[in-house]
Amino acid sequence: MANTITTQPEPVGSGEARPSILRRALHAILGLLALGAISLAIWPSLLEYVPGADIDSFGGTQQFRIIAAVAFATLMLVRFLIRPPREASRRSIVWGQFASQVGGTLTSERRKLGPMGWEGGATVRWTVHGIEANLCSSTDTSGNGHTQYAADVRMSRGFQFQIVHESLITRALFSQQLWEFALSNMKSRAKVPPGAPNPAEGMAFLAEKEILIGDARFDDAFLLKSDGPDLARQSFGDAGVAYALHELNGINKSWHMSLMNTASGAHRLSLAIPGIVLDPQTLEAGRRLIEASIRCCADRGMLASGRTQAA
């Protein structure tokens, strides 16, 4: 179950800060006492360094060990019960403010292994044009964090696309030769049941040439591939989408945006940015791009009727 987190941190006054300071001090003192107790339980001879202490007054070494161990357990229990509250992380604060601005909710979700690696933790959900969108993060197998906006949409005029900032690296990664080789390898290794769709066929458009939309500024800045060129031109020719895309590209050029089929029959609209984004300007630019894309699809009659669940 997801736990809703307060999205706005409350200011702490001087009257509230004093008990917190005392609790932290007591928590530290109990930790030192517990360390002393466990040390005496392991090395009873340390009692010789305590003025006036005699181990025989405790009933001998074995009895003293038991008393010290019980004292250690008691101190640790009390220390646990009075532990100071954990401070909100910077991500919880920044993403909480983002959730308030978009009229959404910030939740903490269980970590699970997904397509992007370990997913879960802080997640913001909000609604755009009747469609649920979310902001979440993932960690890949190399330990690198990624921030992702996503929404599952049902299309009446379905198509797929992949778009990135154009550079030498992205040109190499999206080259026809590379994808022809990769898809050929996928087809030869895939064991697809009779009648089931072949994943490689759904990605065949990546082995085609990039699409130009006829806007020189756009075509010079981005590398776009799609299995529906006309619908892709309509989407990225939209003034709101183009403006939001250029805005994000001016802040961060490592993003990757896609619209792809899923096994459920819906299309997943996704925007991924490397790293855990804590900059409010970047968070807002990503939100505007996702929302502009959803509104464009709705305005141009590309969406099927009915609400769609968040990714």
Image (cartoon, rainbow, N blue to C red):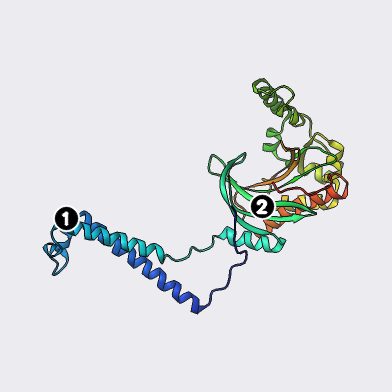
116 or 111: which is nearer to us? 111
The residue that mark 2 highlights is 135
Tell me where residue 183 appears, x and y as whole percent: 70, 26
| Mark 1–mark 2 distance (CA, rounded to whole Å) | 58 Å
Can you give x and y, in whole percent of width and height, for residue 45 in the image? 15, 57
Pointer 1 or 2: first along the chain: 1
**Which residue sits furthest bottom?**
15
Q: Work out whether residue 92 or residue 163 is closer to the camera in this orientation and state it.
A: 92
Q: Is residue 60 above or below residue 198?
A: below
* Residue 262 locus on image (x, y percent): 72, 37
Q: Is residue 72 left or right of residue 94?
A: left
Q: Is residue 3 above or below residue 194?
A: below
Are the residues at dot 1 and dot 2 in contact (C-beta closer than 8 Å)? no
Residue lying at 24% horizontally and 57% vertically, measured from the top left: 39
- Amino acid type of disc 1? Gln
In the rendered image, residue 306, in percent from the top left (x then y), is placed at: 81, 48
Extreme top residue here? 188
Residue 278 visible in the shown view: no
- The disc label shown at residue 62, or none: 1
> Tag 2's secondary structure?
strand
